[in-house]
Amino acid sequence: MSQRSSLPRVPQVCIILESSHWASRARFQGILDYLRLYHTWCLHFVLGGPEGQRLPQPSYWRGDGFIARVPDTGLALKLASQKKPVVLLDPDAEVTLLLPQCSRVSLDNELVSQMAADYFLKMDHKRFAFVEPLLARNWAVTRRNSFMRILQNKHFSCEVFTPNRARATSWEKERRHLCDWLLSLPKPIAILAASDVEGREIIDACLFLRIGVPYEVAVLGIGNDEFLCNSCFPALSSIDICWEDGGFLAASLLDAKMKNRKTPQSILAYGPKRIVERRSTERVQLTDKFVVSVLEMIRVRDGLDIHVGTLARQLNVSRQWLQKKFKEQVGHSVIDEIQLRRMEKVKSLVAESDRTFNEIAAMCGFESGNHLRFLFKKMTGQTMTDFRNDYVRRTLPNHSSCMRGQ
């Protein structure tokens, strides 16, 4: 017997998971994390979006199992004819009905809604709304219904925006409908978006309508897609999901099934990690348009190169009147707000960039790096080095933090 033939066979696994979406790439990373810890598989997958996903040709692929986020019922029917283990990853209800015998791993959307409701209630919001996606999705229905039920149990109602799905093929075409709805809402109000896509559309519409976010409308997304969250103004707060855990759990289920075909069906869930707070949910609820405009002017500049006198001249009011009006509404001075915004910019640069602390001090208008270090410790209770290290630790994947069985 040759040395090559005596080596153990490497399992052949097909991954049906679109690579065009960042959350799916995170799920894929979870699969890879599992393999690095436990096994080596030979992976077959197709790059691209959900429409390009397909089964490998049986003429050249002799596989052992599938991990599949099935994009449509046609592919589900093809999978049903396979005589290999299949683990479903975040399947829709229709796919689950077609493949009832398969183990599956799903995001706990009820837990996501619970986190959102608890967050808004803790911030003492009294009015609430939910925005649905353009296309009807089971996960969105679960998020909406769970959010409304939790609020109803606390004796609060919830407005719902449902796109006109008969005519709307894009948010651009649905913008006027969304704007009319936003104008009709009582304010201040807290809005949960079905995902970050809808959250970004809400903020863009509010900017167009000159509705102050978060002063009149607080907006929370789901998914924490950093590109989407940071590409609107103000940046979108979002519920961070343990997407990697979904892939990690799916790989563990398939591994067990390939080793023993008699392994019983398993249904596992993974959940949200935390709420990543950005400016769209800051704890300020205001209806005074003048004060909202002052806050917006400070925020646009991140508190940099802006002074009380400059604001007073631009708004055609006296410096004294501006400071009195602002403190009555917000609870602290204009100068305090400018310093707070400037320090938020510093914290962002410390956490999310590799710039030196002296470079950050120069960018943000501080006298020196040492002066900034002193103020940073005074305002945050941490050194800049500790703050940066803590951020790195928090963003490392932890596959044990968000998993649970059902």
Image: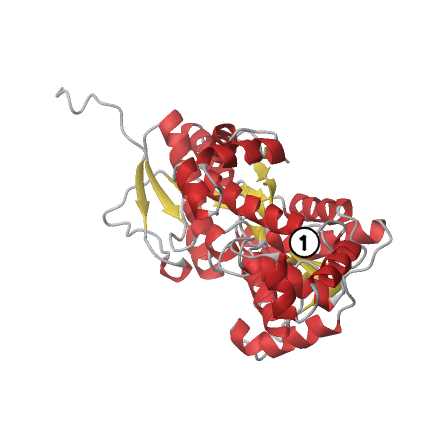
Task: Name the spot of residue 194 as percent of width and height, x first.
Answer: 62, 58
Task: Name the spot of residue 3 as percent of width and height, x first.
Answer: 14, 20
**Left or right of 171 in this view: 332:** right
Q: Does 60 appear above or below 265?
A: below
Residue at figure coordinates x 52%, y 47% from the top left: 345
Which is more toward the observer, 159 or 285?
A: 285
Q: Secondary structure at mark 1?
A: helix
Residue at figure coordinates x 65%, y 74% from the top left: 179
Residue at figure coordinates x 77%, y 48% from the top left: 121
Q: Going by the picture, which residue comes out furthest to the left? A: 2
Task: Name the spot of residue 265 as percent of width and height, x first.
Answer: 55, 36
Residue at figure coordinates x 58%, y 75% from the top left: 175
Instruction: Check disc 1: other Cα within 10 Å, few if <14, some if 14-19, many if 20+.
Output: many
Q: Is residue 230 visible?
A: yes
Q: Does 176 appear above or below 286?
A: below
Q: Does 404 appear above or below 125?
A: above
Q: Going by the picture, which residue comes out furthest to the right? A: 155
How many numbered circles are shown? 1
Q: Quadrant location of the C terminus? A: top right
Task: Name the spot of residue 329 as percent of width and height, x first.
Answer: 78, 57
Which is more toward the observer, 246 or 318?
A: 318
Residue bearing the label numbered 1: 334
Which is more toward the observer, 288 or 335?
A: 335
Q: How is the image coloured?
A: secondary structure
Q: Quadrant of residue 41?
A: top left
Q: Quadrant of residue 92?
A: bottom right
Q: Quadrant location of the N terminus? A: top left
Which is more toward the observer, 24 or 285?
A: 285
Q: Is residue 189 visible?
A: no
Q: Amino acid at mark 1?
A: Val
